[in-house]
Structures are given as C-alpha cells and as structure tokens.
Amino acid sequence: MKHICVSLGIFLLILAFCLFSANFTSDRVQETSAMLKAALDARRAGDELSSLRLVRTASAHWKKYEAYFGTVLRHAEIDDILGEFARLEAFARGEDQDEFYSTCAALLTQLEHIEQMEWPFAHNIL
C-alpha cells in the first residue's frame, strides 16, 4: 500500500507541474502575441515607431522567460522564434511592410502552435 501511495504522490506532483507549465507557457505566449498584434495595428495605422517599440518589447518579454522555456520546450522551437523576432525587428525598422506583415503572421502562428502543443489534447498525444 505504501508503494502505491508514493507512486500516486509522484504522479500527482508530475501532473501538477505539467499543468502549471502548460498554463504558464500559455499565459506568456498570449502576452507576447498581444504585443505583436498591437505592433501590427500600429504599423497599419502608420505609426512605425510604436510598431518597432512594441516588437522590441515583445522580444524582450519572450527572452525574459528563455531559461524557463529552455527546460519545457524544444530548443529548435525557441531558436526559430528568436530568429523570427530578429527578422521582424529588422523589417519593423525598414520600409518593406509586406515582409513585416508576413513575418509577424508567421511568428504569431509559431507562438500559437507552441501554446496548443503544451496542452494535453488528443492530437498532441496520439
């Protein structure tokens, strides 16, 4: 009986960490996505300076949690997102709006994928 209780306790601790991690990651992704969407809105309104500032803020926000993401996400995904942030910032400084919009959309899609990947949906398990 003791072994069952210890095993159940360990299982519950692991489950609690997984749920905490999924929730924490989801919140950070949503915050970052909201900043990127605000950057898109600012760019569409013609406010390139605010757009650049919001892209930099979103990038800094994501990088603030990089150590945590390194433990719960695949490193390739983290590297891809950091690379997209660098590209997006370069396009935010430039004149090419189409590249800015497409890079921002790609980054938002990657962030959405990470958020969905963290939750125990059937398509993630199977």
Image: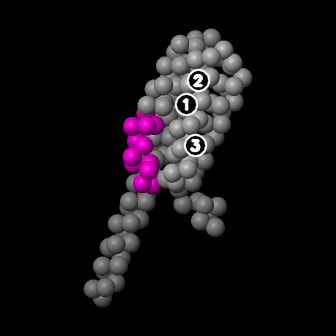
The main secondary structure of the magenta stretch is helix
95 left or right, relative to 115:
right
Which range of residues does the magenta coloring cover? 61-72
Disc 3 crowd, CA 10 A, few/some/many (<14, 14-19, 20+):
few
Question: Rounded to the nearest whole Å, what is the CA distance between mark 1 and mark 3?
Answer: 10 Å
Judge whether 26 appears above or below 14 on screen: above
Q: Quadrant of residue 9?
A: bottom left
Point out which mark residue 86 bears.
Answer: 1
Instruction: Pinpoint residue 59: horizontal percent, then vertical percent.
Output: 48, 31
Q: Tell me the crowding category of disc 1: few under 14, some 14 to 19, or many 20 or more residues within 10 angstroms, Cα based.
A: some
Q: Amino acid at mark 3?
A: Asp
Q: Residue at x 49, y 19 (%)?
A: 53
In the rendering, which numbered label is found on residue 27?
A: none
Q: Secondary structure at mark 2?
A: helix
Residue 39 in percent (x, y) is at 56, 23
Label 1 sits on a secondary structure element that is helix
Look at 31% across and 80% down and name the residue there. Answer: 5
